Image: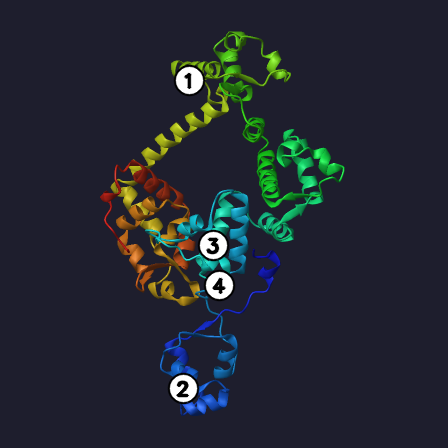
């Protein structure tokens, strides 16, 4: 397993040799001769021969200094050291029980995944990886709500674990206490053994699988507690401890039942068969599934029959649904307006590049592969394809083609920061959602 401490020991990337470099080499060493250059630099004859004949695409930092007599200029590397990437992969697999490296490798491929994925990037047999793989892993954690300092902390915790085998009980003990205090989960339920056998020293270690499950549950519990929603906490307890067939948690229907009692003038006892006090004091936690279904159905029916109810009165789940409906209507109307002549002119103005074409072709700004651009802009792929198909001339002017299309990072950055771009993005997200099939969009920049 990759250790977090190895991330600091990153080797210098190889330097790509360009035609300009070879021309500059001829200016430094004149006349440019293989034997002379090999003698001056101390490099092997055949290596120098291959460099001068364009057979070597990249060289090490040390060899660059020997050939050119100076440090290499800063360049965007095509490959980076894979240590950080492998550490994040280990952590992701640790937190997602049942996921394999083969499953992850499919997320790294564009288009149809290969029949046999290349797993050498995970083992370290291939030391370097494309920078996009590291970006994909960081985005996975960011989307899951783990980023920045928290990600570094979790990587450090994973690095501190002893390799393989069993884990001392003293390492899992604080985790068990945290889960007991937060979820009311007895340690025996996690250990699959009486906790007294560990506390008395009869047993001194736990299996790696038990430790991994406890740590994963701890991280999930921390995230749930941070949101502070009692219903989510109870559902997590139910998931861990196991539910009861034919029964639902009272907390899952509490808001809807309170709403019916307050606004529909319904009796809680008619739904529960007893008073709400029994559940509010914790003497009972579950109700029959059919009772829960009746509460939900009556709640939805009353909301449909009373359309003038204020939004703040609705239960949280129904309020979110009503807000989504209102937002959908708003987005649909915005899409309609932006599809008219004035809206199309406005769209072109938002998407119009702010710099000259040569500036977007400059290597110093960097480039992003076309199929990775939707993630940079926070758009779905189908919506992004629609936007590009409708504005091909703009995206061609800021892209370049070298066996596949790339878009300038400068343009993507300025586009994501432009005022009102979120309206254009929402328009195409709505159009993509409305499409019955993807065949309606012409291919562009592929």
| Of the two numbered discs 4 and 3 in the rendering, the one whose residue sits closer to the viewer | 4
Which residue of the protein is positioned furthest toward the front in this rendering? 202
Which of the two marks, 2 or 3, is nearer to us in this view?
3
> In the image, what residue occupies the spot 61% across and 12% down?
277
Q: CA distance from mark 4 to mark 3?
A: 20 Å
On residue 26, the disc is 2
Q: Which residue is mark 3?
A: 135
Q: Is residue 236 left or right of residue 116?
A: right
Residue at the extreme right: 200
Asked whether disc 4 touches disc 2, contact meaning CB atoms under 8 Å apart, the reply is no
Query: In which quarter of the view is residue 9 placed?
Result: bottom right
Q: Which labelled disc corresponds to residue 125?
A: 4
Where 180 falls versus 104 (above or below)?
above
Q: Earlier in the sequence, mark 3 or mark 1?
A: 3
Query: Is the C terminus in the top left, top right, bottom left or bottom right quadrant?
Result: bottom left
Where disc 2 sits, the SS reads helix
Cα–Cα gap, marks 4 and 1: 58 Å
Does residue 347 sit above or below 276 in this rendering? Answer: below
Residue 308 makes an appearance in the image: no
Is label 3 or label 1 in front? Answer: 3
Label 3, label 1: how far apart the Cα atoms are: 43 Å
Mark 2 and mark 3: Cα distance apart in space = 38 Å
Q: Secondary structure at mark 3?
A: helix
Of helix, strand and loop, which one carries label 4?
loop
Q: For the residues marked 4 and 2, what is the alpha-carbon distance in whole angstroms?
A: 36 Å
Q: Is residue 206 left or right of residue 28?
A: right
């Amino acid at each position: 397993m990759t250790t977090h401490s190895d991330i600091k020991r990153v080797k210098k990337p190889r330097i790509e040799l360009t035609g300009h470099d070879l021309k500059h080499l001829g200016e430094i060493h004149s006349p440019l001769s293989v034997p002379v250059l090999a003698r001056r630099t101390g490099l092997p004859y055949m290596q120098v021969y291959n460099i001068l004949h364009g057979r070597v695409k990249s060289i090490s930092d040390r060899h660059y200094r020997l050939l050119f007599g100076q440090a290499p200029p800063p360049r965007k590397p095509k490959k980076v050291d894979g240590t950080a990437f492998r550490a994040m992969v280990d952590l992701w697999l640790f937190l997602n029980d049942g996921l394999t490296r083969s499953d992850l490798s499919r997320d790294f491929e564009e288009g149809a995944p290969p029949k046999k994925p290349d797993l050498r990037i995970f083992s370290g047999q291939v030391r370097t990886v494309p920078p996009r793989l590291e970006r994909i892993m960081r985005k996975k954690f960011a989307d899951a709500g783990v980023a920045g300092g928290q990600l570094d902390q979790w990587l450090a915790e994973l690095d501190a674990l002893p390799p393989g085998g069993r884990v001392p009980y003293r390492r899992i003990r604080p985790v068990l206490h945290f889960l007991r205090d937060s979820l009311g989960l007895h340690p025996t339920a996690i250990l699959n053994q009486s906790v007294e056998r560990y506390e008395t020293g009869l047993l001194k270690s736990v299996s790696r699988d038990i430790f991994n499950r406890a740590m994963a549950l701890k991280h999930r519990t921390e995230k749930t507690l941070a949101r502070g929603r009692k219903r989510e906490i109870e559902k997590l307890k139910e998931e861990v401890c196991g539910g009861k067939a034919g029964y639902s948690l009272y907390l899952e229907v509490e808001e809807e039942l309170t709403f019916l009692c307050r606004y529909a003038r319904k009796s809680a006892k008619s739904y529960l068969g007893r008073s709400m006090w029994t559940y509010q004091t914790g003497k009972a936690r579950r109700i029959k599934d059919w009772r829960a279904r009746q509460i939900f159905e009556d709640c939805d029916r009353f909301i449909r029959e009373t359309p003038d109810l204020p939004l703040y009165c609705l239960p949280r789940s129904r309020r979110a649904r009503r807000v989504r409906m209102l937002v959908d209507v708003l987005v649909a109307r915005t899409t309609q307006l932006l599809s008219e002549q004035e809206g199309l002119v406005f769209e072109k103005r938002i998407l119009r590049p702010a710099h000259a074409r040569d500036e977007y072709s400059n290597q110093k700004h960097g480039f992003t592969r076309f199929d990775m651009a939707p993630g940079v802009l926070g758009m779905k792929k189908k919506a992004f394809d629609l936007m590009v198909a409708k504005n091909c001339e703009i995206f061609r002017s800021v892209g370049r083609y070298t066996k596949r299309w790339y878009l300038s990072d400068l343009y993507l950055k300025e586009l994501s920061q432009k005022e009102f771009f979120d309206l254009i993005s929402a328009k195409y997200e709505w159009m993509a959602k409305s499409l019955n099939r993807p065949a309606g969009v012409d291919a562009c920049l592929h």
